[in-house]
Image (cartoon, rainbow, N blue to C red):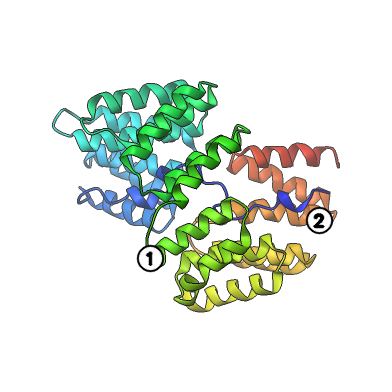
Amino acid sequence: MRGKNRIRYMGCVLLLVLAVLTGGCAMGEASGEKTAEGLEALSEGNYQEAETLFEEAVADGETLVLAYRGLGLAYMGLGEYENAAEAFEEALAQTDSRMPSTTEDIRLYLATAQYRMESYEDVIDTCNELLNASEEGNADAYFLRGASYLCEGETEKAASDFDAAVALSPSDYDLYMNIYECYAQENLSAVGVTYLQTAQSLTGDDTEYYYNQGRIYYYLGNYSEAQQMLIGPVEEKYEPAMYLIGKVYLALDDYTHALAIYQQIQEEFGESAQCYNGLVQCALMQGNYDMALTYISLGLALDGTDGKQELYFNEIVTYERMLDFTTAAEKAAAYIESYPTDEAGQKEWEFLQTRQ
């Protein structure tokens, strides 16, 4: 049976800010009824519905650059990165020289899809095109290209691009943490830590500042300092801080306080798959597998798809913990069919084949 590190927490490793799809949905007014409905479905995390609506928008001849772009975003949400890349290519084909910002936007999403496909040379080419056309530079493009160089073993080029990204967005906490994640995945955490330390030197005195500083301490594994930084934001009921302190409590094996904070989140902000996943962590850590399955069932019954990948993954883990390897293997097979590019899911499935 696997250790507790096999459990997956919502958002624990989110490499690319660009993959937060709702951040890219609004791009001027949608041209056409189906495109507008598709953008609304994207904003609600209903990616399957969005896919259907954008396909209808394409078939109806609505503004194709927006329809294909939206279709690409829907595929991204579904984890179908090859289809997403094809859709973004189609969207680019509909652009012209009068649409520089639209072209840049779509190229960023294309590069993100290519990165998810591990097509690093393609990412580099796409980002080269974007940066060559940009007068002011683009932090996201430098980050994506740097991440791809790092995966290709070109550490000097990676560092140069990461530094260029930071120079353009010196106050972007997500950027610092994403760079750290890139180095950590290449077993170069010591290099990545220097970026977290730079982020620690940023100043501020508002709720978001203390939340972000708490994030840095959490990444560094300094949970007591993270907890101190989060006291104010949590008292103010800042939702991201409440989720983060739940993760801090879990890291400290303080399941009583973790359970209480996730229950409070539900009371304050309503049900969410992300919150149910936090409750699943509490149940799993306490060995209460039946309750974990109950939380998973409640989370999966919610509308939309946000947060559900983690619930499906932890469903596999729960059945593993129950020593029901047959059911776990069935769940793993379904998981890798839905999320074929997820390496952790593939490893779970391979592990479970040895238990049949």
Q: Amino acid at mark 1?
A: Asp
The residue shown at (22%, 34%) is: 136
Q: Nearer the viewer, residue 108 or 340?
A: 108
Q: Residue furthest left?
A: 98
Q: Quadrant of residue 85?
A: top left
The residue shown at (81%, 56%) is: 321
Q: CA distance from mark 1 to mark 2?
A: 44 Å
Q: Is residue 26 visible?
A: yes
Q: Decide if residue 161 is on the left or right side of residue 303.
A: left
Where does the image place residue 46, in percent across and percent down from the top left? 44, 55
Where disc 1 sits, the SS reads: loop
Q: Decide if residue 178 is on the left or right side of residue 168.
A: right
The residue shown at (85%, 54%) is: 323
**Height in image: 52 above or below 65?**
below
Q: Decide if residue 240 is on the left or right side of residue 287.
A: left
Q: Quadrant of residue 100?
A: top left
Q: Amino acid at mark 2?
A: Arg
Q: Residues within 10 Å of mark 1 (few under 14, many from 20)?
A: few
Residue 205's disc number: 1
Where does the image place residue 188, in percent across and percent down from the top left? 60, 33
Mark 2 = which residue?
Answer: 321
The residue shown at (33%, 51%) is: 38
**Height in image: 124 above or below 39?**
above
Q: Nearer the viewer, residue 63 or 193?
A: 193
Where disc 2 sits, the SS reads: helix
Quadrant containing the C terminus in the rendered view:
top right
Q: Nearer the viewer, residue 253 or 71?
A: 253
Q: Nearer the viewer, mark 1 or mark 2?
A: 1
Q: Decide if residue 106 is on the left or right side of residue 99.
A: right
**Height in image: 184 above or below 10?**
above
The numbered mark, 1 or 2, whose residue comes first in the sequence reads 1
